[in-house]
């Protein structure tokens, strides 16, 4: 997912008075940070590519993409596919741009030839892709690791200001190894062309790019930067330091001749979407969980309302297909809510109940005297230990949404519910055991001490 701001932005122009080169900054920036950031951006327009011609390319001595082809695999010249008139026109326009910017050159005697594929982007424009499926089969996997996204997302917690950046046609800024360039050839009405710069769609292109940015920003990653392939984020715990952190990053970009896409950059915001996750300085704020259980003579259900730090509601109504007491249904609803929070990677949680008894039992104020509730209390404490959590009592009048959802599940058939997320549980939570899955060995590996146990479980 493309990095996007999570708050209002405004446009500034780094080329006043012509106003042809806009950049986006956070609308809620405070002084003096706002003025410092605007001045800084106006002094560094060369770090952005406002058009194709502004791209310079990485020095081949620093990074280039090698295919490392398996020479035992016979080269494939794909059968040329016919394109519609609109696709053909878009292809020729893209080819002209690529030629003008020296991203491609005419291929003389290529052994591998692939077909072009035109994909319409969300803005209505066509994007040229190449079907490198046959070529990729001959390329061994580059095992260079990409960063763990969850670790990178966590690394942005608690930062007051962030800037989201994207390289301009990032892959096209890395040159192809000259010996491999002709293998990345494709059809065009003009003839055969091959990439001199690394195209999107080649196997291991992401690993090549990550290797480069890790080298470039090695002194900043983990401190003031997060980098995942061509998505870059500069983060600052204190807003006053943000321009200084950007200054270091821009200096490295200039040293390596890498340029940014101004249309995909946003500077100086407190929140935004990065790698598909919403990040903000408030990400360490707790989520809110409202729970209620309801039971009648024939039905029982739970109402769950989970609220994220941005006040987005996730409403669930759960029907329990087994007999439960009033207290048990409250525990079942709570356990369902905690499972929902766990599935959404929630770490900080405030739980609100209108059952004074259960709140006091969970907090250890009241002793659980009913034997049938002891397993529920034990399982609940185990679930709660996965969060930084507070469990509090509130009046029923403040727990309206969860109460309504629980009554919905306990009073109507599930097939009639359409406007909330609904579900059903066929057995009590205390009977859902955590187990380690086993499977029959299918390889010729030597036996281990576990084999006898597995055989006993399977056959008795």
Image (cartoon, rainbow, N blue to C red):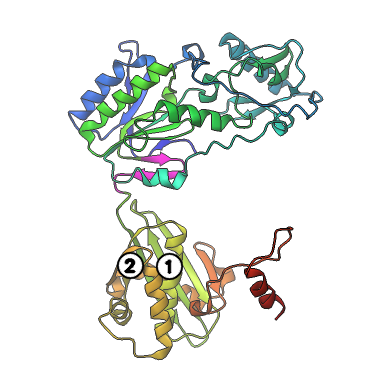
State which quarter of the image contains the C terminus.
bottom right
Q: Position of residue 276 (x, y in %)?
A: 47, 43
| Residue 275 inside the magenta-drawn segment | yes
- In terms of depth relative to the viewer, which is nearer, 149 or 346? 149
* Vertical comparison of 20 with 436: above or below: above
Q: For the stretch drawn in magenta, what is the main secondary structure?
A: strand
* Vertical comparison of 348 with 73: above or below: below
Q: For mark 2, what is the residue? A: 351
Q: Is residue 91 left or right of residue 246?
A: right
- Tell me the tag on residue 337: 1
What crowding class fits label 1: few (fewer than 14 Cα within 10 Å), some (14-19), or many (20 or more)?
Answer: many
Distance in Å between CA atoms under marks 2 and 1: 9 Å
Residue at left 50%, top 11%? 53
| Residue 55 inside the magenta-drawn segment | no
Q: Closer to the N terminus: mark 2 or mark 1? A: 1
Q: Position of residue 26 (x, y in %)?
A: 30, 32
* Vertical comparison of 216 with 348: above or below: above
- In terms of depth relative to the viewer, which is nearer, 156 or 123? 156
Which quadrant would residue 11 be assigned to in this image? Answer: top left
Residue range of the region highlighted in magenta in the rendering: 272-282
Kindly tell me whether residue 458 is visible in this rendering.
yes
Q: Secondary structure at mark 2?
A: strand
């Amino acid at each position: 997912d493309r990095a996007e701001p999570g708050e209002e932005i405004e446009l500034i122009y780094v080329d006043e008075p012509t106003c042809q080169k806009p950049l986006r900054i956070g609308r809620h920036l405070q002084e003096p940070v706002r003025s410092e950031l605007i001045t800084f951006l106006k002094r560094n327009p060369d770090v952005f590519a406002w058009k194709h011609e502004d791209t310079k390319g990485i020095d081949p001595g620093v990074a280039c993409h090698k295919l490392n082809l398996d020479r035992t695999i016979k080269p494939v010249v794909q059968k040329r596919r016919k394109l519609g008139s609109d696709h053909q026109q878009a292809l020729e326009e893209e080819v002209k741009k690529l030629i003008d910017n020296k991203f491609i050159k005419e291929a003389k005697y290529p052994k591998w030839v692939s077909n072009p594929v035109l994909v319409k982007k969300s803005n209505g424009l066509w994007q040229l892709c190449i079907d490198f499926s046959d070529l990729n089969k001959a390329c061994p996997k580059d095992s260079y690791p990409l960063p763990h996204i969850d670790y990178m997302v966590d690394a942005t917690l608690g930062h007051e200001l962030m800037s989201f950046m994207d390289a301009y046609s990032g892959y096209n800024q890395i040159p192809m190894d000259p010996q491999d360039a002709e293998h990345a050839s494709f059809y065009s009405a003009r003839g055969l062309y091959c990439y001199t710069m690394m195209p999107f769609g080649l196997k291991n292109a992401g690993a090549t790019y990550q290797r480069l940015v890790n080298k470039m920003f090695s002194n900043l990653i983990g401190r003031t930067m997060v980098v995942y392939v061509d998505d870059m984020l500069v983060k600052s715990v204190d807003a006053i330091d943000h321009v200084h952190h950007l200054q270091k990053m821009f200096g490295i970009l200039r040293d390596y001749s890498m340029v940014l896409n101004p249309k995909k950059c946003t500077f100086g915001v407190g929140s935004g979407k990065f790698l598909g996750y919403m990040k903000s300085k408030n990400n360490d704020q707790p989520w809110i969980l409202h729970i209620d259980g309801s039971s009648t003579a024939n039905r029982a259900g739970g109402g769950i309302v989970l609220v994220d730090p941005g006040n987005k509601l996730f409403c669930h109504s759960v029907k329990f297909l087994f007999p439960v007491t009033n207290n048990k249904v409250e525990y079942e609803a709570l356990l369902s809510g905690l499972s929902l929070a766990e599935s959404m990677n929630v770490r900080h949680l405030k739980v609100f109940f209108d059952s004074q008894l259960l709140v006091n039992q969970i907090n250890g104020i009241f002793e659980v005297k009913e034997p049938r509730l002891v397993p529920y209390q034990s399982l609940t404490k185990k679930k709660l230990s996965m969060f930084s959590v507070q469990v509090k009592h509130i009046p029923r009048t403040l727990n309206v949404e969860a109460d309504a959802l629980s009554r919905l599940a306990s009073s109507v058939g599930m097939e009639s519910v359409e406007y909330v997320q609904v579900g059903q549980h066929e057995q009590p939570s205390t009977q859902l055991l955590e187990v380690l899955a086993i499977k029959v060995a299918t390889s010729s590996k030597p036996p281990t001490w576990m084999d006898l146990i597995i055989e006993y479980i399977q056959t008795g």
